[in-house]
């Protein structure tokens, strides 16, 4: 009986592995100052050379506290893509990500209790093997210093579809 249960568990685990359609290539967070995230404080992320080419999904992670005073947040994401470790970028891309944090009824769209976690898609890009990326993120809000923003993250997954 124990062998049968073990065999069934192994079969279920083996069958579920091929169903993965995205593999994480990069997932990192940068902390913002406790006193508040200043408009000119830019967060940087260095993505090492990619092992294979293909389509990559990029998303932003955001962690805020209950001290964040707004319903949304506008972020500017600038990317310099370097081909084969060259010092001159082969492509420069800028995306504006409008993060809606609270719905019309005042309910948070994030997960958590005292810290809220959000994920927002940036874009899908076709990248080549050996490409590396330098990503910077800054806020584009009217207020110079934003309280309550704890961390900003970047996640890149390979789209195997």
Image (cartoon, rainbow, N blue to C red):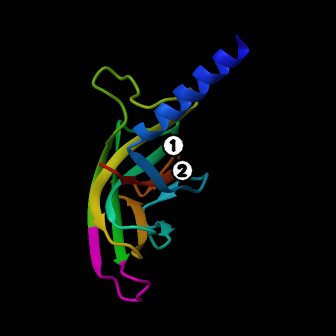
- Give the residues drawn in magenta, as a range: 82-93
Residue 126 percent location from the top left of the image: 27, 64
- Give the residue furthest to the top: 1
Q: Looking at the image, which residue is at 36% across and 44% down? A: 120
Residue 27 is at least partly visible in this image: yes
Residue 31 is at least partly visible in this image: no
* Helix, strand or loop for the magenta stretch, by majority: loop
- Give the residue furthest to the right: 2
Q: Which sits in the foreground, 45 or 73?
A: 45
Confirm or deny contact between disc 1 and disc 2 (CB under 8 A).
yes
Q: Looking at the image, which residue is at 36% across and 30% down? A: 102
Residue 7 percent location from the top left of the image: 62, 23
Q: Name above or below for residue 41 compared with residue 85.
A: above
Which element is circle 1 on?
strand
Q: Looking at the image, which residue is at 46% across and 69% down? A: 51
Q: Is residue 92 magenta?
A: yes
The quadrant of the rendering that contains the N terminus is: top right
Of the residues under marks 1 and 2, which one precedes in the sequence? 1
CA distance for labels 1 and 2: 5 Å
Q: Looking at the image, which residue is at 40% across and 67% down? A: 52
Q: Is residue 46 magenta?
A: no
Q: How packed is label 1: few (under 14 Cα within 10 Å), some, or many (20 or more)?
A: many
Q: How packed is label 2: few (under 14 Cα within 10 Å), some, or many (20 or more)?
A: some
Residue 108 percent location from the top left of the image: 41, 27
Residue 151 is tagged as 2
Q: Name above or below for residue 116 compared with residue 135.
A: above
Which element is circle 2 on?
strand
Mark 1 highlights which residue?
63
Residue 10 percent location from the top left of the image: 60, 28
Q: Determine which quarter of the picture holds residue 9.
A: top right
Q: Which sits in the foreground, 81 or 12?
A: 12
């Amino acid at each position: 009986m124990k062998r049968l249960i073990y065999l069934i568990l192994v079969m279920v685990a083996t069958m579920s592995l091929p169903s993965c359609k995205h593999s994480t290539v990069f997932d990192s967070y940068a902390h913002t100052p406790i006193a508040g995230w200043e408009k000119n404080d830019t967060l940087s992320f260095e993505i090492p050379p990619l092992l294979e080419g293909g389509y990559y999904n990029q998303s932003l992670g955001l962690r805020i506290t209950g001290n964040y005073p707004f319903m949304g947040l506008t972020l500017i994401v600038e990317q310099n893509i370097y081909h084969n470790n060259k010092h001159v970028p082969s492509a420069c891309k800028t995306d504006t990500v409008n993060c809606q944090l609270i719905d019309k009824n005042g309910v948070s769209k994030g997960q958590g209790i005292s810290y809220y976690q959000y994920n927002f898609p940036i874009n899908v890009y076709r990248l080549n093997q050996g490409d590396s990326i330098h990503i910077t993120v800054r806020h584009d809000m009217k207020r110079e210093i934003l309280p309550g923003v704890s961390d900003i993250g970047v996640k890149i997954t390979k789209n195997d579809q």
